[in-house]
């Protein structure tokens, strides 16, 4: 049974920074692909970025790549999301989503590809 524990959410002023973490545990977990998604209020869950074990270089949705950075620690089985220059439109519930499968790049944005989902952590960007 894979367990995911997300942390680091909260309220931040516009222009501020936050770092989210996702710790994975459980037998059989490899997390060959791990992703972050977010769900803004009243909208569908959307892809933020992901990292594959094979490449090591994260992929991001274009509009976030200059402000968000994904880190993967394979030894600790953690995934982090560093968010800088936050904007009110970044307000959302953020989800960690791993899979033991090594996804192809074109599939990274597809929610059904991910076997596991974190409980979600709320980020609110407001003054």
Image (cartoon, rainbow, N blue to C red):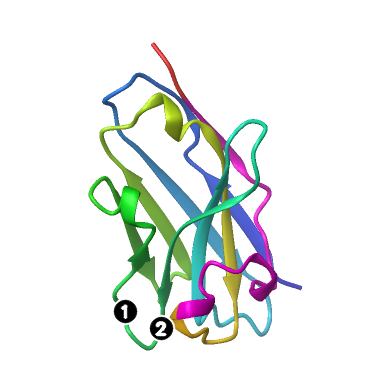
Residue 27 at what x, y percent from top left?
Answer: 68, 81
* Circle number at residue 56: 1
Residue 39 placement: quadrant: top right
**Above or below: residue 34 compared with residue 60:** below
Magenta stretch encompasses residue 92: no
**82 horizontally vs 33: left or right:** left
**Above or below: residue 116 compared with residue 101:** above
Cα separation, mark 2 vs mark 1, equals 5 Å
**Residue depicted at x 64% and y 65%:** 111
* Circle number at residue 53: 2
Residue 42 placement: quadrant: top right
**Above or below: residue 14 compared with residue 47:** above
Is disc 2 placed on a helix, strand or loop?
loop
Is disc 1 placed on a helix, strand or loop?
loop
Magenta stretch encompasses residue 120: yes
Q: Which residues are magenta?
A: 106-124
Q: Residues within 10 Å of mark 2 (few under 14, many from 20)?
A: some
Q: Residues within 10 Å of mark 1 (few under 14, many from 20)?
A: few
| Furthest residue toward right | 1
């Amino acid at each position: 049974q894979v367990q995911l524990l997300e942390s680091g959410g909260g309220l931040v002023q516009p222009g501020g920074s936050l770092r989210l973490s996702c710790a994975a545990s459980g037998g059989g977990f490899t997390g060959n692909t791990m992703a972050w998604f977010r769900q803004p209020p009243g909208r569908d869950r959307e892809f933020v970025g992901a990292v594959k074990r094979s490449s090591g270089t994260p992929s991001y949705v274009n509009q976030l790549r200059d402000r968000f950075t994904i880190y993967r620690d394979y030894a600790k089985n953690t995934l982090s999301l560093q968010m800088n220059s936050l904007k009110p439109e970044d307000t959302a519930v953020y989800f960690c989503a791993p899979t033991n499968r090594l996804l192809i790049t074109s599939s990274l944005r597809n929610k059904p590809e991910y076997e596991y989902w974190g409980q979600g952590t709320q980020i609110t960007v407001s003054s």
